[in-house]
Image (tube, coloured by chain):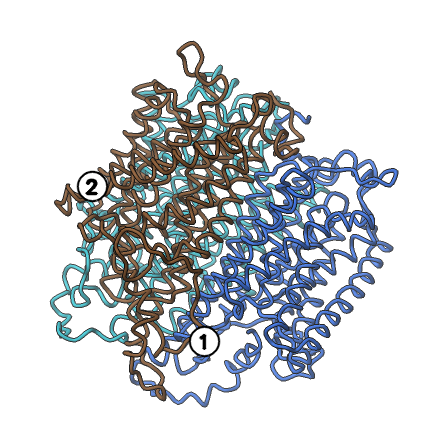
Chain colours: A brown, B cyan, C blue
Amino acid sequence: MKLTKYLSVGAALTLLPTFALAQDAAPSFDEIGPYIMTTLLFLVGGFLVFWMAAGFAMLEAGLVRSKNVAMQLTKNIALFSIAAIMYWLVGFNLMYPGDFNGYFALNFVPTVLEPVGLSASDAALDYASVASDFFFQLMFVAATASIVSGALAERIKLWPFLIFVVILTGLMYPISGSWQWGGGWLSELGFSDFAGSTIVHSVGGWAALAGALILGPRLGKYKDGKTVPMPGSNLALATLGTFILWLGWFGFNGGSQLAAGTVGDITDVGRIFANTNMAASAGAVTALILTQILYKKVDLTMVLNGALAGLVSITAEPLAPSLFGALLTGAVGGVIVVFTVPMLDKFKIDDVVGAIPVHLFAGIWGTLAVAFYTGNWGAQITGIIAYGVFTFVISLVVWTILKGVMGIRVTEEAEINGLDMAELGMEAYPDFSKG
Amino acid sequence: MKLTKYLSVGAALTLLPTFALAQDAAPSFDEIGPYIMTTLLFLVGGFLVFWMAAGFAMLEAGLVRSKNVAMQLTKNIALFSIAAIMYWLVGFNLMYPGDFNGYFALNFVPTVLEPVGLSASDAALDYASVASDFFFQLMFVAATASIVSGALAERIKLWPFLIFVVILTGLMYPISGSWQWGGGWLSELGFSDFAGSTIVHSVGGWAALAGALILGPRLGKYKDGKTVPMPGSNLALATLGTFILWLGWFGFNGGSQLAAGTVGDITDVGRIFANTNMAASAGAVTALILTQILYKKVDLTMVLNGALAGLVSITAEPLAPSLFGALLTGAVGGVIVVFTVPMLDKFKIDDVVGAIPVHLFAGIWGTLAVAFYTGNWGAQITGIIAYGVFTFVISLVVWTILKGVMGIRVTEEAEINGLDMAELGMEAYPDFSKG
Amino acid sequence: MKLTKYLSVGAALTLLPTFALAQDAAPSFDEIGPYIMTTLLFLVGGFLVFWMAAGFAMLEAGLVRSKNVAMQLTKNIALFSIAAIMYWLVGFNLMYPGDFNGYFALNFVPTVLEPVGLSASDAALDYASVASDFFFQLMFVAATASIVSGALAERIKLWPFLIFVVILTGLMYPISGSWQWGGGWLSELGFSDFAGSTIVHSVGGWAALAGALILGPRLGKYKDGKTVPMPGSNLALATLGTFILWLGWFGFNGGSQLAAGTVGDITDVGRIFANTNMAASAGAVTALILTQILYKKVDLTMVLNGALAGLVSITAEPLAPSLFGALLTGAVGGVIVVFTVPMLDKFKIDDVVGAIPVHLFAGIWGTLAVAFYTGNWGAQITGIIAYGVFTFVISLVVWTILKGVMGIRVTEEAEINGLDMAELGMEAYPDFSKG
């Protein structure tokens, strides 16, 4: 659970004097071992979640048409970089402000790391290094932004999108995140979201949904009441992206144990790994079987999204379930994707990569399912609604302003010719004839 | 060596009362450090071996023709997911049954993990968490199934293949695995296979060979006594897949040390990493030089398979050799690949990606080579034959039954048009003209 | 800092008798914990840096034209394998010779690892296992060679290039590396290069620059005083490669802390991770904004190279800067790339992937910038010049000899038709029509 984190980050600053270790003797591993192991957990977990940025990039590059691939790649590397800077500049301290009113912290200060060569007596020995914690947490905000880029692909302008990313990663995500992981009002209420089915994935999904509504569908996507398929240009990349995300998710969920230096904690991390893998597998197999039954043909992109929906579903509670519970949780995620992808098309909401079914709908399911373990249905529903209303409404406002001020959609001509040539002046695959 | 594992898994259930740690005092790192480090080894090793699933997917997607890429990707993500579920459902407990007759354990029960927040007094402190062990081991069974999918690519139907995967991962692999890693008759005999040259790789290779024989070669592969080259559609993906497998292999072999919490164990893990890397490098360089000499041109796919053959070769004993020994072991693997790939074609056995030379032939070599260190040639040969006969015969039977009951081969028309459109109704690269 | 490493490697051989641990009692974690953690750091750091080999391969395969992709892949897997063998054969002991004259050690012996099952009393408990150290260090030399392959792509013959790699990885890199990391004259002088902005990246860049001068530009690259764009064939691969390199860099810089078993060391590793990520992000965002301003269009390949230049820039000192310092360091790297890529073209120096701006120019900047923290400008400048003169001059000589003896450039016909068909007789993407 991320609940206690905000205490510890504060502890590094406020509780230091209370550590009265003798400076003369080297501290024993009984004192420092947990700190070292948890810091290591954040570093390994962090680089795994970093890797998810590549996963989103490959998934999205594989699912857009070839004429928009370079733009999708540009958006992905840019959004990650911007998220990293914004989270340092204001996000991290907005999200983990220490003692605050529970709703919003006026804590607009950049992140400061510990000094080089920290001594054990100056360290938050009950937790981990601030740098490792910061490194781990910033990867999560980047994931949120990646979700948006996939849904709005193939028609949004680069710079308005990046401005939205600035606001999402610097303000929206950290403020709503502080309600729970920063020790705010939702954590007081008993809401539970272990690694972020809601706080990360649904938030990304809500922002994407608002954007998709304001932006409108791609040209020609809905014609005479029918949905025109616009198949992705490179399913090998999309599959690679899915495998990368799956791998990164071990860090996403496992690292969110926030401790690795006791028998109980490291064993729990193992349990989380096993459950995470099971939910992904169950989501994939469910989509495999369902698409065979419904369409008489297996749909690879549904299988990929089934695996991802399984992962999102288990993210709110990857620790408590048994392996069988994880299987059920992930399987429901797979069902959700198979039924809600065409449903969105019915409403003419054009989500290029299926990000809204995977991250928003499966995220809601996963967050709700936590109540099977906690019993606190009220808190789960409150949290889901709170994140939804906050993120969706603010996103609507921001997208509307961006639309009014600078326009968020490329010209028809640019959309038809592809954003790569129109906005970047380059192609992703210049050597190959288009079919 | 994996030999002692079955004891430890049992230990978590049976030996717990003998740990008489005081519940009051926090256990010291001297007591819990090795458990934490070994659990961490399994988690890191496990995610690295998980990553090999992506490696097989990319390697195979790169080596099939573009019309069959989406199918190959579907098979790979599906087989991994099925393996994960089957190994939980029956595989893990069939393979590590604790005390059993040494040949076959009637132990058809799903895997159960430790409770959340395990206390040190309830943990198998001489080993690692059950969840981490399960997580690590299930990645190996998935590798076995991946080997089969590569060899049988471009002509096998999706569902019969997946049914075979169910049987392979739920029954065949775990039962034969129990003979050695479960403490069965082969481990009693002194057979040695550190990380699975035979138990994982040759088993996959034998199952693939049986399938290739029953299935027959691709249409037009052997014509008028000649082998018609059918080049892979994307060598960049194939190379990426090879690098992914190489990376994953550090977890595959290193994690198989099964311990990381003493100076001796962590040093051994380092030795295994260095030897594994050396064998892969030697296999690649050998294939590079040999193809230059034999064909006057370097063959990239041979170099890739040379690296993989080096990796398979060192897998049976990555610890004992010196770096020079590892170089020799891997180099022989490279030689094997260069000479046996065309040999299979002579016998009209159509192995699309070279899986049989890499995993079966180099696996036999690697397993035999262990006897240079143990001296026990009889045990090594017995083990190689036992795994070969068991896996090959049962695979032949299963493939034959599947062929009779539902057919295992797509229609000629589907094969010519590509499995992607015929079986999935989608293409991997729809935007690009085919040359 | 890598400064103390040569002591420790020697320590494993010479100081062993001074460890007088009781053989009877198991050593406590206070004694062995740091050794275990640092060994683990090298293993995790090492596999991350290994992964960079895949990153270079994908980056370069994506940035060359499709007719040269298979050759670029072949070069990358071959150069890694050769580097691994050469560094074992002579490199490692040339670079870390223990006590030597500070300029050149006559220490031509292959690397020998510790025995299996090392006891704590025989281990260099103040450092890490030799195998893990060797594994980690050899990954760095491979990175150096990868830099060369990118710059000289699309026109150099395979075998002369590989012979250069033999000399670079077996002799040039280890000898100049010993000046600093082996405890030689530059380390005596106070030169500082934490993880190798100069020792790894600039050395690769100097060797590449010498090669580019001797080899000449690609046919048709500079025509009538104009630079003809030759766009890369697969920007998705190039982006993937960049993300892989970024991920691997956490191991590159983080592992170069060379210790992880104290509060100070593991906290420093976390600081390095955070700074490394910040510098990459700043480099990418800088190139994003600059190309928009200068060219009115964002240039994806510049953004990718901006991220990489940020990473190279922070490599000489990833620990001392604050996050803001890391941002500035990386941003300057991004500026350098945007301005020096066209500058090289002005001088008709044809660097296919931008390796010289990224690795040489940003490497010089990063190394210089260390003096903001150490104040020792003289030592930094001396080091930069020493590595430059040594590597550039010897490279010029070697390339010239290779050119005279066997020729280093493919025929005009081969260059026009592509190196894949001419030198390998295979294509990377045979199924796709060329546009």
Residue at screen point 74% across, 72% down? C386
Residue C263 vs residue B358: left or right? left
The amino acid marked with disc number 2 is: Thr
Badge 2 element = helix
Q: Position of residue A350 (x, y in %)?
A: 42, 25
The amino acid marked with disc number 1 is: Gly
Q: Position of residue A430 (x, y in %)?
A: 66, 31
Q: How many marks?
A: 2
Residue at screen point 20% across, 46% down? A321
Packing grade of label 2 (10 A; few <14, some 14-19, many >=20) is some
Tell me the mark number nearer the camera, choosing from 2 and 1: 2
> Real-space Cα distance between discs 2 and 1?
44 Å
Frontmost residue, C348 versus A282:
C348
Frontmost residue, B6 versus A63:
A63
Q: Position of residue C120 (x, y in %)?
A: 39, 79
| Residue indicated by mark 1 | A117
Q: Point out which mark residue A382 bears.
A: 2
